Amino acid sequence: MRSRALVATVVLAVALTAGGCTGDSGDGAERNPGGGGEKPVTNGVSPVHSWSYDASDFNGGVLGGPPQGWKVDGAGGAGVVPFPDETDRSLKIGAGTRVTRSFATLEGTVEVAARVWVEQTDGRLDVLTVKGPEGQPVATVAVRDGRLAEMATGRDATPAQAQRWYALRLVLRTGDQRYDLYVDGRRALASQPWQSRAAGIARITAGGGNPGTMYLDDVNAHRIPDPSVDYLVLDQFDDASLGSRPTGYELSRDGSLQVAAVPSNDDRSATLTRTGAGEATAVRRFDAQRGTVIAQATVRTDTLEGARTALGAQTSQGRTVAAIEFSDGWLVYDNGRSRSRLVSFTADEWLTIRLVLDVPTQRFDVFVDGRRIDPPAQNQQLVPRWAFRDQADDIGRLLFGVRDAGGLTFDKVMAFTSPVQSPPGTVVDVRKAPYNAAGDGVTDDTAAIQRAIDDVPANGSVLLSGGVFLSGTIRLKSNMTLWVNRDAVLLGTQNDDAYPLFDATTAGTPSIGGRRRTLILSAGADNIGIDGGGTIDGNGTKPEWAIERSGGNDTIRPTLMFLTKGRNISVRNVFIRNAAAWAIVPAEADGVLIADVNIDSNLYANRDGIDIVDSRGVLIERVNVWSDDDAICFKSYTTGVDSALVRLSSVGHSQRANGVKFGTESRGSFRNVVVEDVLVKNVDKAALTIASVDGATVSNITFRRITVDHALRLFFVLAGKRAESPNPPGPIDGVHFESITGTGLAAPSMATGQSLDGTTYRLYDVLLSEVHQWVPGGARTVPPEPAEYAGLYPESSFLTGDSPAYGYFFRHVDGVTIREASSAPRRPDVRQHVALSDVDQIVR
């Protein structure tokens, strides 16, 4: 709906949680302007903040006493209690008592969240108050005479029931001194004024007022990370009124442009239709740019017939230089002399289209769902690129159009330039003496590239340009950027001997998933960047590399990037394809940015897209993945993953696995992760998966504004013990699904714990808020309850055929809140919409 001009580098903010825990999550970019970022180091990688870690959910607190770091005022007292049970504890706050947690001041856009439970709703009880550094109240949420209300203006948010849990979330902006209030995932109040002016957020208080008892749980406060680019345009339409014309768009006389509740009411888009005889067009202007401009949108059309401009780019004067069209079942590029088919599509299929437009060369790249679509062979250059349709002095407009009946729907419209336009610092060119890399795609350039890396001074860059550089393992060092220019390819060799084995001695980390070889290695290196707009090709088509993990020695296959034991790691603005194994693997890293990366790694046998392993402070944005195995995956072999945000990204394809997954390796923990504004399509297993089967603790995981198109299941959540694990199942506490839409699904969604050897291991606090799915249905009888998880590999395809529900099945769960969740079966079904087995505290 409006652009955001923000700092050009990511800030991985400290997330100081009640009780001293870090936790970093986010809300939609269109709602959170951020601000207050730190200055980047020379190579553009932002410094990570210091971290303070402790339990935020009170589960580690001593029973009976107040948790460390909380101040208690009042005669009623406060202490940690086994409520709802011994595993999932909370803080009990007695009548007339107030508890306070203070932390370092957070500025910019700050999120504060908590779960609250009140004994009674008469009178007034301040369940959550956010304060500034001087103790001034900024926002107060109270239960007042049967209502949840905010106290700055006295506005009611929603009716309040006694003796049930509510999930509260406040998104507070220091810039305009306003905030939004969310209750159980629904935005109940928008843009409320702060009670008092404050420079930031520094305290959380609960309790005070009503003589009744309250319980507090899962408290956290954190600053939402800034975008890693300075947007010229970022339109998501979520804040615009339904039916309104979105601001910033110039509309032709024969067109209508309206904000629509597509795919859902909280995840809105814009729909363009033709109302007259001429073409309907919508133009979005921005400040003209003369360098390289990236334009991207998620688009769909409701019919195969006719022609529509899915995404076009124009000069500031209105000349169209590139336009991708929907045309009779194909995406097409017409350069004015010939028409080229790019990819086929189906009606109502969402597509993520990305154009990388380079004014100096008058050429551009096209990416669809993460795959680069190259021009016909006769037009190929060293790195093939499409020619502009018309000469351009600049790029200053985005274009959408409809020439026939039917409509065009678009969302997540963005335009920006890369924050780093050229190799930073002192540049060492591998093609120049004394390195003399050949760049011919045949000569082994490993030694030349490595010598350049060893020689580059601090905060400098190693440059690959104007060639195809064949290489084995290269090892990066601290304070450098590997710059793969737009006209260059770093090509992995297929010579196994060029990838020496690494282990804990050479790489500083144990073997992870059998990963023992890699093309790009960093171990213990800080402040490293991989950038430049070029291509990194793993050359993974070697037949011996196409093996299943159970079918041979997986250690022979080189990972494309293995980046371990470092701080401030940045991978951005590159195209990755044909990985021989997993593609991008940051492991045991502190401060990770992966942005503006397209991955096409759909070669058979365990080719993951991104694997975040035992790392913290992670931001993944504007990433589009097409993979064979799990597309975006969080894994834990040791300490765990803490504080990660995935946003404005897409999974175009997963041939054999999941879209976004936590596990299977799950030995440490997964805490404070948000996945939002993401498209997931054409995945073989579940779109969203949590498989904790090695003892991990999972807490505060949120999936928000996700569109799913063709998957086995919308979501699959499991806490269990697989056969080879020595550890009992760990708890899963706080999994929220908010504004999720799924079409083309093959099986119901499922969330389950495990009953094992007389002990039941449970899930806690599962929220469904505006979750809508289209499922097959068709059952004529109700099957018995499925067997308990028996320790097999925990793929989301197990128990597919015997769910007692056609929509959602929950088992061994304490605390399920279902608010506006639906399932539409394609065929009549005799089963229940929602089936429950051993579920306590269900709220509908």
Image: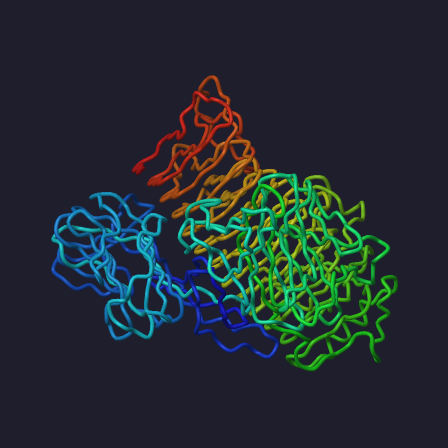
Q: Is residue 451 visible?
A: yes
Against 688, residue 323 (above or below) is: below
Position of residue 43 in the picture relative to residue 615 (left or right): right
Looking at the picture, how far across and down is residue 467, in whole percent? Answer: 82, 67
Position of residue 489 in the picture relative to residue 821 (left or right): right
User: Which of the 4 image quadrants contains residue 624?
Assistant: bottom right
Looking at the picture, how far across and down is residue 704, in whole percent? Answer: 45, 50
- Between residue 676 and residue 386, name the one nearer to us: 386
Looking at the picture, how far across and down is residue 648, in whole percent? Answer: 53, 56
Looking at the picture, how far across and down is residue 175, in whole percent? Answer: 37, 71
Quadrant in which the C terminus appears: top left
Looking at the image, what colour scheme do you see?
rainbow
Residue under the image location 66 percent in, 59 percent down: 355
User: Which of the 4 image quadrants contains residue 483?
Assistant: bottom right
Position of residue 841 in the picture relative to residue 758 (left or right): left
- Between residue 791 and residue 8, name the one nearer to us: 8
Residue under the image location 43 percent in, 36 percent down: 752
Residue under the image location 11 percent in, 60 percent down: 75
User: Which of the 4 image quadrants contains residue 114?
Assistant: bottom left
- Between residue 797 and residue 329, name the one nearer to us: 329
Q: Is residue 697 visible?
A: no
The mark total stands at 0
User: What residue occupies the far front of the structure in this picture?
Assistant: 277
